[in-house]
Image (cartoon, coloured by chain):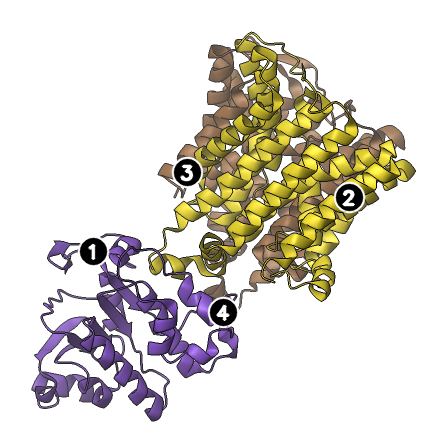
Chain colours: A purple, B yellow, C brown
Amino acid sequence: MLNKVDIDMRVDALGLVGPNGAGKSTLLNIVAGIVKPDEGEIFFSGEKVTGLHTWNLVKMGLVKTNQIPHPFRTLTVKENVEVLSQRRKGKNKGTVEILQITGLEEFENFYPSALPFGYLKRLELARALACNPNTILLDEPLGGLSPHEAVSMVETLKKLKESGIKLVVVEHRLSELFTLVEEVVALDRGVKIFQGKPEKFSSDPAVASAYMG
Amino acid sequence: MKYAGLIYVIGIIIASVLISFFVASPFLTLSLTLATIYMGLALAWDFSSGLTGYMNFGVQFFFGIGAFFTGYLYYAYRLPITFTLFADFALGFLAGILFAIPTLRLRGPFFTLLSLLLPYIAASFILSFWTILGLPTIGYYHIASLASSPFRQLVYLSFFDAVIVTLLYLLYRSHFGLVLRGIRDDEETISNLGINTFKFKALAFSIATGIMAFVGGAYASVNTFAGVDSFGLTFLLFPMLIAVVGGTKRILGSVPSSYLTIIISQYLNLVIGSATLIVFSIIAIVLVIITQQGFLQAILRSRVRAR
Amino acid sequence: MPVIIYTVVYGLNYALIALGFTLVFGVSKILNLLYGSLYMTAAYMVYLFNSTLGFNLIFSDVLSVIITILIGVGFFLLYIRIARDQMSFLMSMFLSALLLQYIYSYFFGGQSGLAISGPVTSASISVLGVSVPESFVVSSMVSVVLISIFWIWIEKTGYGKEVRATANDPEMAQVFGINPWRITLAVFIISTFLVSITSILIVPSSVVTPTMWLDPFVVAFAVSIIAGLGKFRWIIPSAFILSFSQVLTQLILPYNMFNIVGFLIMIIILLTRPVGLGG
């Protein structure tokens, strides 16, 4: 249940944090067009997009990854990416390139069931990239990863950011997240309690009370 | 070789034509002809139902309207059969789209049940419609035969089947087919990733129904009549059985499977008559339960990498 | 006046036919593709016991109900356990319906219809000046009685509440000690019982053919869709909508177009208000 959350994203990478149940995933789902909000408006690249179906949003360049990977189990890794490409004229990242960026090239003919969890998360990212997005919403991309894998994932995300893709990242692992994002928004029980630079986050009193209880 | 499987099944089709020529048994030729009819239906059924997971129980409707449309075009305008067959495809395609638009957004079982109802209303409706147009009320039309001899008919039909299987297999291997497989795998996720699943499902369905109508027209010209029986349920049972035996979702398997199934059924018919239908229904049920993949696929796989 | 009488009588009959079907779907979300076949089975069993074997009619009726329930439950248990996904479940149910059609066709003869007797005569009586088979009138009254009983049972009794709980939230129901599986099975048995009774009452006014299973299925499905699957209080009104539109269509349009009307209404409802009128 989100309550009048108002966020204006002006940075290249935004972090979205908060205790469990704060509404972070819900917010992402609403922005991505998966869930319709009861009230409020969403603007993307200056256009009002509230209530539009996901495929319209994807056409506009907005894509979301899942917290729990949902790969296509009957398709190989390569097919998982291919199935989404070739839909837009102009500069598409090729499947090979996407697999390289996400470190999946050696696995391209494997089925998802053969992949370790960390690679499934990369596959989620790869599929998002196949949609040729300019903005990616990531729901806990580091969840379940070992520290080593998490660092690697953050590096990949940084590269994507540098290539011009905007990121909105919901995460619990704050130390890794803060190396990636320029601004942080914190939610608690459906309400925005903080928006500002990562450095200011831990010293904020509202944040402290939300996390400590 | 990438398309080895396709070459292989086309070889099977050619082989059957040759066998018919050399054995020169009218019974065999008839059985093979019947097999080609059911093959076309099975291929189309497998492509739309197996690939999308939205099962089409209305095969006989599209088959029937193809038969009737050919009948009508021939009766009213004396149009040549080859022309009417393409008109049948167009009609079937259009009818498929019309049906799909309201129904594809429903959940799978509802779609399936509604498709089952189509032939149910079709027979009486079309007969009435025909009466309004002032055509013979019985609904049987005598149509010029597809070709001058049963063997020639077999050749034509086999050729059509080769075209159909090539078309559908190429589609299956294309990006279009990949998207369909993705939809069958996880429609919600692929929709969230920007694919307009409705468009793909509707297209796959309508291509299949167009083919079914095409085959219906061909059947009508083979039998030289179209009638209410064209809407019979055997035109659903056998294609379904063939597809299951051949391996649903695999397209190519339906080719050898249809020869096998139909020839067996024809001989069985000689022995036990209409109890054949009982036997085959039971076999179909058992197969559906035992396997999603079809046991012929295992045989195919050991010979050729047909995927 | 005939329009009203026909609408009411046929409507109530449709409602009775639909009752069992919507019961199963409302509770377990299972589309019973064998529903019409079980209707047909009951009729053939009556023929077998009464006409062929010469048993007493009432005894035949009872026997046929029992056998139909056994057959229905047999198929149900088989496929519920074995089918791995919805597609194979649907396919096996449908193929079983075909199987039954072929079996009856083989053993009882093909297309020409057989006649069976019913507990009530099929002779026509006059209802407010309109001629209607007496058995239809009786089945209409039975329909009202049964639907009311079910309505009360579902809404008021303890067991009915369990059924509703299972329908709404099977997992939650389990928490409260309700066994959804037993409820599903019980509901299926009741549904089959209902469809057999219906068949015994209604079929004597027409003929028994191997392809007769589609008609009751379509009616049951259509009424259930219009009402909203599982919405008992809407069954009768929805059945009236169906029968009324059919009667009207037959009056206005020539020929046998009335089948389409039901189909079209279903599509319209599914598109505009998919939960049905009662949703």
Residue at the limit of the structure toward the right, as seen here: B271
**Secondary structure beneath label 4:** loop
**Secondary structure beneath label 2:** helix
Q: Name the mark on residue B16.
A: 2
Question: In this rendering, which labeled residue sits more in front, label 2 or label 3?
Answer: 2
Disc 4 designates what residue?
A76
One can see residue B84 in this view: yes
Q: Name the mark on residue B101.
A: 3
Q: Which residue is drawn at 74% across and 55% down?
A: B286
Disc 2 and disc 1: Cα gap in Å?
A: 63 Å
In the displayed structure, B72 sits above or below B293; it is above
The quadrant in which the N terminus of chain A is found is bottom left
The chain identifier of the residue carrying mark 1 reads: A
Q: Does the CB distance between marks 4 and 1 fall below 8 Å?
A: no
> In the depicted view, which residue is nearer to us: A92 or C241?
A92
Disc 2 and disc 3: Cα gap in Å?
A: 39 Å
Labels 3 and 4 share a subunit: no
Question: In this rendering, which labeled residue sits more in front, label 2 or label 4?
Answer: 2
**Secondary structure beneath label 1:** loop
Disc 1 and disc 3: Cα gap in Å?
A: 28 Å
Q: Quadrant of residue C21?
A: top right
One can see residue C131 in this view: no
Mark 4: which amino acid?
A: Thr
Mark 3: which amino acid?
A: Ile
Q: Is residue B251 left or right of residue C3?
A: right
The x and y percentages for residue C26 are: 50, 48
Mark 2: which amino acid?
A: Ser
Q: Which residue is drawn at 55% across and 22% down?
A: C9
